[in-house]
Image (tube, helix red, strand yellow):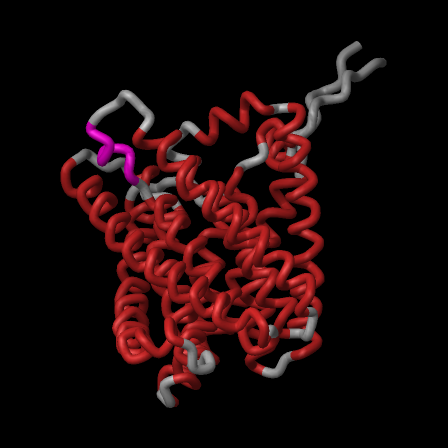
Amino acid sequence: MLSTPLPPSPRLAGLAPARLSPGYFALVMATGILSVGCQLRGWTLTARSLLVLTAVAYGLLVVLTVWRFVAHRRELAADAHDTRKAFLFFTFVAGTDVLAVGLAGQGHFVPAAVLLVIAALTWVVLGYTIPWAAVLGRSERPVVAAANGTWFVWVVASQSVAVAAATLEPHYEAARHGLAVVAVFSWSVGCVLYAASAIFVSLRLMLYPLEPRELDPPYWVSMGAVAITVVAGARIVEMESAPMVDAVRGLVAGMSVVFWCFATWLIPVLIAVGVWRHYVHRVPLTYEPTWWSIVFPLGMYAVAGMYLGRADDLPIVEWIGRTWLWVALTAWTLVLLAMLHALFTTRSREPERT
């Protein structure tokens, strides 16, 4: 009796270069921000372990992305022109910056600075090419009909540059003023981009029919983008005196509190959307790479509370952040188990044939 081996489950193709989702760097973002959160809590061993996992995931995804660029350029270009996926390329920028912040928090300032340079340059390049390729350069109109939750990843990338620059500023005296300019500039751009993205996505939700499947995990980035704006603002408030920082310190401090309140308000809304999607309309709750787009906002909200509470002397906000870190760690564990199950579970074999 002979049997023909079945191909692996299609879910195993999730990390194949040809089909690699540009949003997989959200795994790096989620793991890295939890490392930062654990470091803030004083859980040094856990923070270091998560940072190692972050670096390993980052290295693997960079290799796979380069492989995809060399061998599967057509598929990569198709993603860059797809309004549903294009803005996920900004997860590379955010993932690079989050890894840089994690390394800096554990004393590795040189590699952190290198990663910041890579992220900042990529942010500038993608900031002009992705919106043109995916939105402005397309013939389909109206453009607002294509708006979705992934557009907020552009905001996250902008604010991640600000966080990394502000984190490194105390450790590079010669570059302090330059880093201050980068931090305030990218924070300001991120705030404007959030307003624009929120308007486009809100119009999309109000003007066009919306299927339950379309309210996918990246909509959680709307909260994560606000949370990282809070972190960036708190870090800018803590920076040493510099002309650019002094000009906006009061504004940034006040706006950071406003943004934290809005992020808090968004959480019940997003939970209700999830219940409506999966419980009311029975959309299957199966793993996909964008599930990391939920874990990252949860972790970032925890870190935002801790940073803001310390920067503005708000004990209740810091306590909420410290407590919320457990929620983020639980979500990270569940999504990691779901990812491993999806990657290594194969379909049942068919009966043997003679």
Residue at the image point whose x is 37% and y is 70% from the top: 230
Q: Which residues are magenta?
A: 142-147
Q: Is residue 88 magenta?
A: no
Query: x, y (%) of residue 13?
Result: 63, 31
Quarter of the C terminus within the rendering: top right
Query: x, y (%) of residue 328?
Result: 49, 66
Instruction: Please say if 300 is above or below 249.
Output: above
Spot the residue most to the top.
354
Residue at the image point whose x is 29% and y is 80% from the top: 250
Residue toward you, 277 or 280: 277
Spot the residue most to the right.
1
Instruction: Please say if 18 is above or below 326.
Output: above
Instruction: Please say if 331 is above or below 247.
Output: above
Does residue 305 show up?
A: no
Q: Is residue 145 magenta?
A: yes
Q: Is residue 310 left or right of residue 209?
A: right
Query: x, y (%) of residue 336?
Result: 60, 54
Query: x, y (%) of residue 262?
Result: 26, 67
Residue at the image point whose x is 61% and y is 83% from the top: 42
